[in-house]
Image (cartoon, coloured by chain):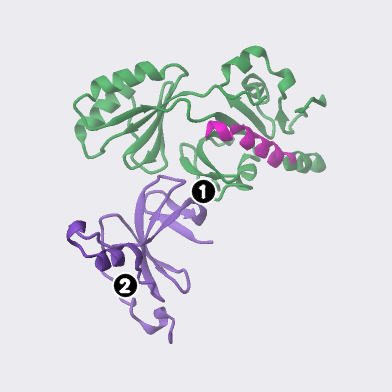
Amino acid sequence: MPAGTGGSSIFLALDGAWFLIGDDLMSELDRAACTVPLGLSAKAFAEAAGTRLALAELVPPGALNLRGDLADHGFVSKACAVLGCELPRAPNSVQSAGELTVLWLGPDEWLVLTAPGGEISLAERLEEALLETHVAVTDVSGNRAHLRLKGAAAREVLAKGCPLDLHPRMFKPGSCAQTVLARTSMLLHLLDDAPTFDLFPRRSFAPYVVAWLVDAMRDHEGVFLNAA
Amino acid sequence: MLLITCPWCGPRDEIEFTCGGEAHRARPQDPAATDDAAFADFLFMRTNPKGLQRERWCHSQGCRRWFNLERSTITHEITRIYKMGEQPEASADATSPARQGGQP
């Protein structure tokens, strides 16, 4: 049950408690892979599975903003053929296939996430297929950082700064939402019932969002330890 | 704090929205042929009712779509929400004294 601090970073590995890996444990490789080095390791996050709360920064995915008219059958069929999955039609829903994830952003707007670096060839294939169609394909890979918050208390942590109704009855796995977290724009994607949230803040806001999340997570450490 | 039902995203908190002021104000078709007083009226003058008002709102932190809503300027009660381009009939009680707040 090691617990300690190294510099300004935090390292707590209590069984069943929240788990956060500090900068001192982050390998140079991880640091280079992250666009915004925030001192959080994805590797350590995987090892923290089963803990009450875990926060990680992931390598930002390749991201394309796709706009087109759902009433245009040519657009829908061509885009779906390239993407290999349906375009989500229901507001705030997500479709995925393989390493592709398509998030609903608006009635004529989607965010296509792919493996880091895969966005260039995907954009080329989309533009080629949709050459004669009235669409916009924009590479927005540098737009957002990618955080992942997982654990039983994840909903409570987010609820401290998010006006969205995050109750499992309202916000189910496979949902996404553009909303506000701690007064900053945030794209949320709920992956599973753990619950695991993918958070996509604007890159320049990412250090602030992480600082806010770490602060919000402290309470839950206390709650858990008192209960234990 | 208002709970506003975005026509696309469903009920969301007011802080996700931007209010664009009174709705359904038509810009003069030919501004060059419109005299200054009429154009100033279009630009600057608003109805400012005590009661129900149609407004434009944008879900700026969400789907970023504009839509219309009808809101009581007295109670903040939202009586209608409809998409851009739609212009439903006035609420039946839009002119009722109770909704208008009684005596001015």
Q: Residue at x 28, y 22 (%)?
A: A127
Residue A11 in sight:
no
Q: Nearer the viewer, residue A94 or A202?
A: A202
Under circle 2, the secondary element is loop
Give the amino acid at mark 2: Ser
**Nearest to the observer: residue A42 or residue A207:** A207
The N terminus of chain A, quarter of image:
top right
Near-viewer residue (B74 or A150): B74
**Residue at 34% across / 27% down in the picture?**
A85
Q: Is residue B28 left or right of residue A216?
A: left
Quadrant of the rendered image containing residue B82: bottom left
| Magenta stretch, residue numbers | A202-218
* Quadrant (top left/top right/bottom left/bottom right) for the C terminus of chain A: top right
Instruction: Identify the mark at residue A169; answer none if there is no mark.
Output: 1
Q: Residue at x 19, y 57 (%)?
A: B32
Provide the secondary structure element on which disc 1 rests.
loop
Circle 2 chain? B
In the displayed structure, would residue A27 be above or below residue A192? above
Q: Is residue A210 magenta?
A: yes
Residue lying at the far front of the rendered structure:
B36
- The x, y position of residue A195, in whole percent, is 58, 36
Q: Is residue A1 above or below residue B54?
A: above
Give residue A181's position: percent from left, percent from top.
57, 44
Mark 2, residue position: B91
Spot occupied by residue A5 in the image (x, y as percentages of width and height): 81, 27
* Secondary structure mainly formed by the magenta segment: helix
